[in-house]
Amino acid sequence: MKNNFKTFVKDIIPVLLGVLIALWIDNWNEERKDRKYIDNFYISLVKEFKDTDKEITEKIPYQKALVDSLDFYSNNETLSLLVVIEKAGGVNGPRIKLNYWNALSNSKIELVEYDKLSILTDIEEGNELLKYKLNKLLDFIYSNLTETGKKEKVILKLMMEELIRTQISVQKDIQKILNE
């Protein structure tokens, strides 16, 4: 009986060591794949955020031109909102690209460091807020296109300034990711 036990232990130790080594190699390989996945994710995310940062930077002067036009023509009761908007070059809103973030947040979000995760969620929330404000702005414009009064021009100006502030806030968060 004692011999059987010794034989059993001699036979089981190599099997256990083999299993432990296989588990260690599997864990190491998974960690390597996860690091590669996150590295590729950040490379793609940075490209996407550079495009978004550039688009916000390009759109803000047009938006400020509209704000200036609304301010300049606010007392002119012969020009409608539509005419003022046309003189300023239209209403321009940036497109915030979050494709890679959305893909990651639906799959391997646990691989992202908390600090970066916090910034990315702030960007996503800022994007939702921008969409909401832009929709409200467009609703206001469409329902007041032919209005010529100062009140409508001032309200639109305030809405545009608020939109610009929100974009700048999102852009600052994007730049935090780009600067890391």
Image: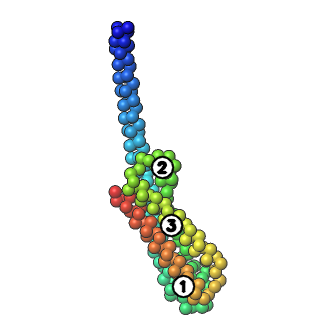
Q: Where is residue 96 in the image (x, y as percent from the top left)?
A: 49, 62
Task: Tell me which label, 3 or 1, sits earlier in the chain.
Answer: 3
Report if residue 59 is visible in the image: yes
* Label total for image: 3
Residue 154: image tag: 1
Q: Tell me whether the residue at label 2 lies in contact with that at label 1, contact meaning CB atoms closer than 8 angstroms.
A: no
Q: Position of residue 27 (x, y in %)?
A: 39, 34
- Tell me the quadrant of the picture where the C terminus can be found: bottom left
Q: Is disc 3 placed on a helix, strand or loop?
A: loop
Name the residue type under label 3. Answer: Pro
2 vs 3, front mark: 2
Left or right: 105 in relation to 149: left
Q: Is disc 2 placed on a helix, strand or loop?
A: helix
Name the residue type under label 2. Answer: Leu
Q: Position of residue 101 (x, y in %)?
A: 47, 53
CA–CA distance in space, label 2 to label 3: 23 Å
Residue drawn at the location 48% of the way across and 65% of the way down: 126
Q: Where is residue 72 in the image (x, y as percent from the top left)?
A: 50, 87
Name the residue type under label 1. Answer: Val
Q: Name the residue under label 3.
A: 94
Residue drawn at the location 43% of the way across and 70% of the way down: 168
